[in-house]
Amino acid sequence: MKRILILIHVLFCGYICPLLAEDTGAARYQDSILKVADALPATLVRLTYLRDMAYKHQYAPYNMTFSTRLYEEARRQKNAFYENMGAYYLAACYDKKHDPDSLSYWVDVLKDFVSQVGTYDYYLEQKAAISRALASKRQIEKAVYVAKETLEESKLRHSNNGMIAAYNSLGCAYGVSSRPNEALDSFLEAYRNFSPQTKASLKVDILSRIAQVYGNGGKDSLKLPYLHEMDTTLQAVISKEPETRKNWSNFEIDCEVKYILHYMNQKNFTVAHEHIEKVKKLLEPHVDPVFWLNVQLIQLQYYAKTDEYDKSIALIDEVTPTVLNNYVSTFATLINYKASTQYDKGDIDGAIETRRYLIRKQDSLNNAFSANQLKQVKEIYHIDELLLEKQKIQDMNYRIGFIFLGVCLLLMYAVIAILMIFMERKVCAAFQCRLGPVRVGPWGTLQVICDVFKMLTKEIITIRRSDRFLYNLAPYIVILASVLAFACLPVNKGLEVLDFNVGVFFLMAASSIGVVGILLAGWSSNNKYSLIGAMRSGAQMISYELSIGLSILTIVVLTDTMQFSEIVARQADGWFIFKGHVPALVAFVIYLIAGNAEVNRGPFDLPEAESELTAGYHTEYSGMHFGLFYVAEFVNLFVVSGVAATIFLGGWMPLHIPGWEGFNAAMDYIPGFVWFFGKAFFVVWLLMWIKWTFPRLRIDQILTLEWKYLVPIGLANLLLMVIVVVFKLHF
């Protein structure tokens, strides 16, 4: 029984192979249709007729013939609208064959017509179909990528059908890769996007897949409403267009099979048998072979549940030749099932003979398969050589690309640090009524660069009685934490180093590594001032990480995701500092205070208090080692500001005001990275303002502020955000 269920599941997700012989009258029928078309004037009349024929015959063997003829005739008449339609029907033919290469060709053709016909629906639907074809070939990662790309493009083009098709393909990819929960989420998201403009075929397909997932999970009560809706939608379409009934046969069979499974699970075999008789009447020559085989397998399951052994054995004997010729992979399971049925019946001798038949047949099949392989060995060998060479080239390109990316990122960190040091000096000077650096370069812009070169030339002094390994390791740990945290930030759409569904968690984990480097620096220096500074810093950073986490968690509750790119995407119609009402504003303020303390900046710079500790934990550091601590402080400041800009101020998302379409369109012209860096440097300026305005706090005041005020307020604010989300008080 389990084997039959597995077979059914595989067939629903799997591949298509021809099972039934082509109708002998198909050729004559096609010729008669084409003769009528040829007799019509070579104008819009002929195109309309061919369009109707292609629409009414979206099943083999007619679909390819009529679709091709429509496309060719439209090309001859230079009619872009009908040419686009012919390409769409041809793409649908290859969709049924699960041929991603041919499908990709026709999708490219459809893309070229978009500007002429003014609709993206046909193009996006078939682009989503590429993902399903890839999933059927077990190219899961590529299938997911294509589906997500199609989804983004559909949202951009406001294509409801494209969006539903993309969610459908994404769910199929997840389903094939044994991720049923994610598959169900995608299908349900497609279902929630149904509209009056949604195509009936997409609706029926989505409803079928939702019912399938619930059925596989044993959740019949959840499955049944979607199955009823699928049936209702099918009957409505068929009653409206009875001439297209054959286009829906596969869906009708699928619906009936699901009803049979449901009633068998409910042990209502009378109703199940009624549906079996109904589905057998739908098995016409044009029906997809997979559905034909599914009907046979569902009958076997029915006979097994009702102990009708003779009927089960007779049916197996009936379908075995067809399975042997076309579904060799299921042949062994089918014959084993026959032997098991004979054993259950009490026919021990028959079961033994069936097993012997299976062994003999498998040997001959294996020999034939091996002989066929031997004929292709040489060709395959050469192909493998070429693929190996191609893979080597790809690997080399990947290595070069990764090295180039790493160099670019390090240069970006350096540039950001230089800009922020210059900004720090200028802001400090402004608050203290000074000019700041003005002599080296225009407006003093080259002063920082000169200081960097000076620091690079400084000697790295090794301290006696220090733990040399930890002493030298500490600054690199600090800079590594900064780099890892920065890698999570989406600078522009699709422009981030790390983008995964636990980005917030990774950021918190990566940023917390920095305190380890600081503690190591203080301990390994063998200096009491360094040790005290490191202990202060450790206590401060560990304490304020809690408030940072509560602030970010407030937005996570609002968005229901920890993926930074998704958090930004949810702010397309407004930034969270406005959309989240009071809780988001409170979280933003707490985050700014805690973030300032996290990076040891004034008024929270007690670990580096010059009057008490000389320079704190990096007192004994010189040269580039000191430079790494110095750079890390500014990079951390930018990371804190970048995170604030991402989760509260929309990240790279432009400022959009609902109802102001002209204003929103103008804002879209500003590149996303400009928005991100603009917002980030605005927050940097706020934090610098705080540093140069407030006096330094004592260590007891720092910890009192955190544990007595910020943590309770953060917890209460998080609870308030939960209430806002539960009762949908946000917009």
Image (cartoon, rainbow, N blue to C red):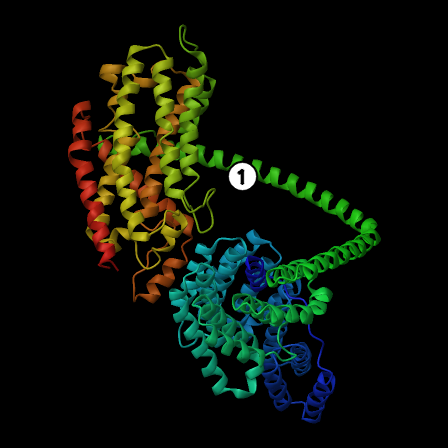
Query: Looking at the picture, how far across and down is residue 492, in whole percent?
Result: 43, 49
Judged left or right of residue 407, residue 578 is left
Q: Which residue is mark 1?
A: 405
Q: Total label count?
A: 1
Residue 627 relative to residue 729: left or right:
right
Q: Secondary structure at mark 1?
A: helix
Q: Residue at x 29, y 31 (%)?
A: 598
Which corner quadrant holds the N terminus? bottom right
Residue 439 location in percent, x, y? 37, 28
Question: Does 38 sit above or below residue 101?
Answer: below
Task: Indicate the amino acid at tag 1.
Answer: Leu
Q: Nearer the viewer, residue 193 or 120?
A: 193
Q: Position of residue 405 (x, y in %)?
A: 54, 39
Q: Is residue 712 left or right of residue 351?
A: left
- In the image, what residue occupies the spot 35% across and 29% down? 633
**Most distant residue in the top direction:** 464
Measured as percent of width and height from the top left, residue 9 is found at 55, 61
Classify residue 423 by image quadrant.
top left
Which corner quadrant holds the C terminus? bottom left
Q: Is residue 119 among the parts visible in the rendering? A: no
Q: In the rendered view, tell whether residue 602 sits above or below residue 145.
A: above
In the image, taking residue 717 as reference, residue 67 lies left or right, namely right
Q: Is residue 446 above or below residue 169?
A: above
